[in-house]
Amino acid sequence: MCGIFGLALSSSYGEKNDLRNINHLVNNLFSYSQTRGSEAAGIAINNSISINILRKAISPKKFIASDEYKKLLIESLQEYNSKKLIKRNINFSLIGHSRLVTNGNQTENSNNQPVFANGIVGVHNGIITNEEELLNKNKDIKKKSQLDSELLLKLINKKYIQDKNIFLSMDNIFREIEGSASVAFFHEDNSNLVLSTNTGSLFYFYNKEIFIFASERFILNKLLKNQSIIALKELKISQIKARETINFDLDKFSFFKSNDQLKVNEELKNNKINLYRKFDVFDKTNSAESIKRCKKCVLPSTYPFMDFDEKGICRYCRRHKKFVVKGEKELFKNVEKYRSKNGDPDCIVALSGGRDSSYGLHYIKKILGMNPIAFTYDWGFVSDLARRNTARLCGALGVDHIIRTSNIEMKRKNVRLNVKAWLNRPEIGMIPLFMAGDKAFYYYARQIRKETGIKLVFFCTGNMMEDTPYKFGFSGIRGGESGNTLTGIKRLDKIRLLNYYLRNFIINPNYINSSLLDTGMAYWHTFMKKDDFLYLYKYIKWDEEIVVDTIVKEYGWELSSDTNTTWRIGDSTAAFYNYIYYSIAGFSEDDDMLSHMVREGTLSRDEALKRSIDYAKPRTDSIMDYLQTIGLNYTETLTKINKIKKMF
């Protein structure tokens, strides 16, 4: 189980002890608690003015060695010291957490603690086993993370507001929950530190200058024996018994327990709730939501070649020109010479199982009136969801479906080698290398054209709403007029891209592996061979609502269970690379699409920002499946990614 711990220091304690000693005390409290859990760590520091939170998916030992932690602790202690010098009664307190993962993967920081939930900043040790029942009973409580701890703290706040007495609230909480819970929390509206447990897994010692608690007695014993850290007379360690609560007043530096009936009855009689102070709560954990973003679209300052004007409008919005398509009339005219007179197949449609190609097959068959053959290139990363959706479309439309595969085992091995090479020396512009193996779909389109004698090949790309120039931008190439097709990149940019990859191969020789043939062939098929395909969305306007409604309502097109976006859900690689982009740069390809929709007037900026935050949530199941497919450990891989220096 996890370890929770914390301390409170009076202003007088600070006058007698060097700040370095306090720093050592906090660090050792953290280190000793690591035996309870080492998969993530976090802290919330209350300096009587604000509450600052920091979380990281690393062990407590590495956490206290991190620059972010050192900076936060030193600045907080200096603030404490400065208030001491001017003789103000300012105290210093904190709560911490060393995590053993039980639910909610630690690689997503929203699943780590301390948690800020509805006015409460808290840490929790234990497992709530009737979480679903509690959520059904409390429909007004909505969770943002996978943590049962978030539910618990929101439930505590709800009861606290209703009961106006923390002892009564905690008693009611323990009557409702099933499982174990030991909690410590600050409330943003008062100066109290509350500790409560239904198992007795909290211990503390106290005098008029210092209060320290932890999940186990031995942790406090180690602190008391370490005289180089804490110069105190030997103190008695006490236990907070099962279903007992301590309400510690940080201003008065005193507390009483829920079993002190006289004081509890007095508080109940007065029916009071202490709401005289409002703390500002700041999450110091690196967060993409805090990045500066364009005032018109949702692109952030970390986007390649980004700049903003005096009004906060980004260069991409300033340069945007309305998307223009060639039109249906031109499309019908261009396909007429290929149209079959006797109902035989007259075109080939590349079908990935994604929303654009699925709608494209529908459009080509039903509206354009062609007789298509669908083809899918499965290189080992077409998801089961995509396979089911292609089956739905082809079955309902009566379309022959040709599937081509490569040596899937080799393809997956090559991806694993390139991902490992990338993790060895992360370079954000090299991420597209993970997908080099899928570019053979151009080759197979040409091959099937030869085999069938059908000249017309449709690709359902060219939709400018989904243009993502940042992928080349991170390679040092400014977004050009590619028309959102790989083959449309300018010749000079193709050379620059080749030079960029060659330079990184030299810097990171791990890329020189069996995947080189895939990479070379991908470059050849994409950038060197003649492009004589027809791109559907160059002719018809793309409308997300029409596209998704059509394929879902008419064909039962299946959505993904781990995200609300419908883009790229059939591509096993997308969830992984979008996690990397968001983790490092604070945005994903969805932000490009949403920003284009704002510029085109089909989506409001507020709605785009709301969707951006929602779509950015890690697609845990898809990422886990992808990494399992290529033979990499999920937690180990994401932990490495999370340690990469952020651009924000």
Image (cartoon, rainbow, N blue to C red):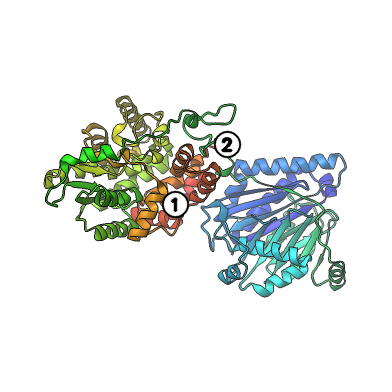
Viewer-proximal residue among 319 and 44: 319
Q: Where residue 335 sits in the image (x, y, percent)?
A: 20, 41
Under mark 2, the amino acid is Lys
* Label 2 SS: loop
Q: How many marks?
A: 2
Kindly indicate the quadrant of the structure image that contains residue 436.
Answer: top left
Kindly indicate the quadrant of the structure image that contains residue 338.
Answer: top left
* Dot in front, 1 or 2: 1
- Residue at mark 2: 292
Residue at 31 percent of width and 27 percent of height: 490
Viewer-proximal residue among 394 and 642: 394
Residue 522 relative to residue 619: left or right: left
The dot on residue 565 is 1
Residue 456 relative to residue 308: left or right: left
Residue 235 relative to residue 405: left or right: right
* Label 1 SS: loop
Q: Where residue 639 sits in the image (x, y, percent)?
A: 49, 50
**The furthest residue to the top:** 492
